[in-house]
Amino acid sequence: MDGVHVATHARGFHPAIILIVASGLAPLIHDRLQEFRPAITFFPKPYHMSEIVRTIRRLAA
């Protein structure tokens, strides 16, 4: 099961869940994640940890 499948299952259990996804396969994954907009933030690899932390802080506020 890949991350998109995990996100789909998580959304099934918790429809209001906010997702953060990182992938080294950005072109392949990006289109599959469109169904989750706007409740998803996507980071293509390589990413900076500071970006992830900033996003988590913004989403938690």
Image: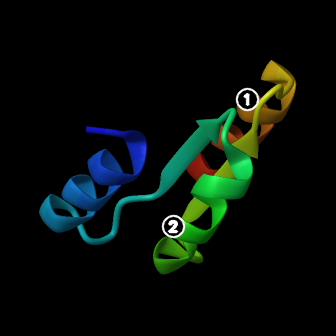
Q: Nearer the viewer, residue 34 or 55?
A: 34
- At 56% from the left and 61% from the top, the residue drawn is 40
Q: Amino acid at mark 1?
A: Val
Quarter where residue 25 is shown? top right
Identify which residue, 33 or 27, lies in the foreground: 27
Q: Amino acid at mark 2?
A: Arg
The answer to whether residue 58 is visible is no
The residue that appears at 24% across and 53% down in the rendered structure is 10
Q: Position of residue 61 (x, y in %)?
A: 63, 52
Relative horizontal placement of residue 37, taking residue 2 as reference (left or right):
right
Task: Give residue 22's quadrant in the image.
Answer: top right
Q: What's the CA distance linking mark 2 and mark 1?
A: 24 Å
Percent coordinates x, y for residue 3 in the rendering: 40, 42
**Is 47 drawn above or below residue 40 in the view shown?**
above
Q: Residues within 10 Å of mark 1 (few under 14, many from 20)?
A: few
Q: Residue at x 59, y 76 (%)?
A: 38
Residue 53, can we see it? yes
In front: label 2 or label 1? 2
- Labelled disc at residue 53: 1
- Image quadrant for the N terminus? top left
